[in-house]
Amino acid sequence: MKNQQAFKAMYEACLPYVFTIVKGYTDNPDSQKDLVQEIFAKLFLNIQSYDAQRGEFKFWLRKIAVNQCLMFLRDKKKQWDFADVDNLNNAPHEYMSLGHLDPNASEQVLAQMPNGYRRVFKLVVFEGYTHDEVGQALGISSETSRSQLARSKEWLRQFFINNKTLIKNGFY
């Protein structure tokens, strides 16, 4: 009985965090619900393997969630909407930072980014994956990962240029 109460409390406390991660990898509400269930099932089945000496629970949970999202995407054999590498604009990209935005605004901005760009951007920038790891996880080449990251940065630059007034007035 105590375990059920503890799991329920953990589920309720972690659900918003997990759902935010899942939303970054799929736009489909049904898939999002399935993924959240799979993540918590994996969490509850493997909770005994968590070791507080190796890191914070939040980071362990995030790793489980990201890995489960990547497995879901691979298993479902999603149609990737990666842009054509041959058309890559080789212009240098300015330094971009989402740090001045609150986390909800950052998620709102990234939600508008094309899926392929967003997936690579989040894996490289937020999760710290290398291009080789991204390529393996998404079933693409490391060169495609690099081009998608460059394009995602260009997309962000254009977004901020086109939305200066909204950003200045606090809408993002």
Image (spheres, rainbow, N blue to C red):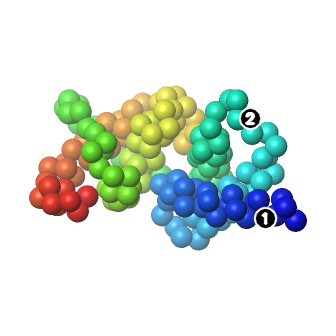
**Upstream in sequence: badge 1 or badge 2:** 1
Q: Is residue 61 left or right of residue 1?
A: left
Give 10 or 35, whichever is nearer the viewer.
10
Image-based side of 131 in relation to 75, left or right: left
Q: Nearer the viewer, residue 75 or 38?
A: 38
The relative height of residue 25 versus residue 143 in the rendered view (above or below) is below
Kindly tell me whether residue 113 is visible in this rendering.
no
Disc 2, SS: loop
Q: Looking at this rendering, what residue extends furthest in the bottom direction?
A: 30
Question: How far across and how far down the image is residue 138, in percent?
Answer: 54, 42
121 left or right of 74 in image: left
Where residue 5 is drawn, which disc sits there?
Answer: 1
Mark 2 — residue?
51
Given the current orientation, which residue lies at the most extreme left position? 165
User: In front here: 11 or 76?
Assistant: 11
Q: Position of residue 170 (x, y in %)?
A: 20, 59
The structure residue drawn at horizontal position 31% and vertical position 42%, both measured from the top left corner, is 99
Rendered-image quadrant of the N terminus? bottom right
Say which amino acid is labelled 2: Asp
Q: Residue at x 26, y 38 (%)?
A: 96
